[in-house]
Image (tube, rainbow, N blue to C red):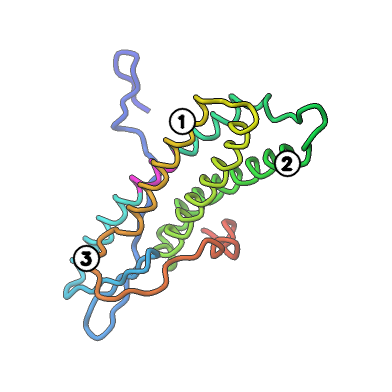
């Protein structure tokens, strides 16, 4: 890492990114299928590669957005951590279950983001990345729902509006994934499912 006048030279840093590389040749067409349910066809190989590069940049941007919201949501949970306690022995199971769900979903979001990065350039990368991101969207909504339990119990107005803002950001990410390049698609098929990640082992990545 190069240092200039005591500051880090950011141009020398290597950042995590999504890098899609896979396409097929069908009937003299270069075909790219994405996990959002759209298929694209190109007459030239360079066009297919250019499209994969464009998609990779878009997905890297979504990776950054999801990580940002994930960090914010997790911080919000930790800031309210002490409030996850039963009220006078009542409804203990509800609050304990909420905390278990939050911890589980946060852990799985982290794992999914790792899979998206390290498996993006594999044969199934075009599908895996979308599956991972769709899971993160679903899991973030679940965490927000469990955090909302504190709003109901403690009447926390600030937390209420934080959660509303998180939902709005999550919705924007999902809409972006669903609609990416849809007008250029030549065929529509079933999009990536949330549970597809369960059968993918990160240890298999070389």
**Mark 3 Cα shell of 10 Å, populated few (<14), some (14-19), many (≥20):** few
Q: Magenta segment, principal secondary structure?
A: helix
- Asked whether, in this view, residue 154 is left or right of residue 21, the answer is right
In which quadrant of the rendered view does residue 106 lie? top right
Instruction: Say which label, 1 or 2, has the lower sequence index.
Output: 2
Q: Position of residue 109 (x, y in %)?
A: 54, 47
Marks 1 and 3 sit apart, C-alpha to C-alpha, by: 35 Å
Q: Which residue is mark 1?
A: 161
In this rendering, the label closer to the viewer, 2 or 3: 2
SS class of the residue under badge 1? helix
Mark on residue 5? none
Q: Is residue 13 magenta?
A: no
Q: Residue at x 35, y 53 (%)?
A: 175
Q: Is residue 26 above or below residue 67?
A: below
Q: Is residue 14 above or below residue 21?
A: above
The outermost residue toward the right is 89
- Asked whether, in this view, residue 20 is left or right of residue 150, the answer is left
Q: Residue at x 60, y 46 (%)?
A: 105
Mark on residue 94? 2
Instruction: Say which label, 2 or 3, has the lower sequence index.
Output: 2
Q: Which residue is mark 3?
A: 183
SS class of the residue under badge 2? helix
Q: Is residue 29 above or below residue 50?
A: below
**Mark 1 Cα shell of 10 Å, populated few (<14), some (14-19), many (≥20):** few
Q: Is residue 64 magenta?
A: yes
Instruction: Say which label, 1 or 3, has the lower sequence index.
Output: 1
Q: Position of residue 18 (x, y in %)?
A: 38, 51
User: What's the magenta region?
Assistant: 60-67
Marks 2 and 3 sit apart, C-alpha to C-alpha, by: 45 Å
Marks 1 and 2 sit apart, C-alpha to C-alpha, by: 22 Å
SS class of the residue under badge 3? helix
């Amino acid at each position: 890492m190069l240092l200039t006048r005591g500051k880090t030279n950011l141009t020398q840093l290597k950042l995590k990114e999504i890098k899609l590389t896979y396409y097929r040749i069908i009937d003299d067409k270069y075909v790219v299928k994405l996990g959002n349910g759209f298929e694209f066809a190109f007459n030239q190989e360079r066009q297919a590669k250019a499209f994969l590069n464009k998609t990779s940049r878009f997905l890297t941007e979504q990776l950054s957005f999801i990580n940002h919201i994930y960090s914010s949501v997790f911080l919000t949970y930790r800031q309210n951590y002490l409030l996850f306690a039963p009220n006078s022995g009542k409804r203990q199971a509800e609050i304990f279950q909420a905390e278990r769900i939050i911890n589980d979903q946060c852990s799985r979001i982290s794992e999914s983001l790792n899979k998206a990065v390290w498996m993006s350039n594999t044969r199934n990368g075009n599908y895996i990345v979308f599956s991972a991101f769709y899971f993160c969207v679903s899991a973030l909504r679940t965490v927000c729902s469990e955090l909302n339990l504190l709003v109901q119990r403690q009447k926390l107005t600030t937390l209420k509006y934080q959660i509303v803002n998180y939902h709005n950001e999550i919705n924007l990410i999902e809409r972006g994934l669903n609609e990416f390049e849809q007008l250029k698609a030549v065929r529509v098929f079933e999009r990536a499912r949330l549970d597809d990640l369960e059968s993918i082992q990160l240890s298999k990545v070389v």
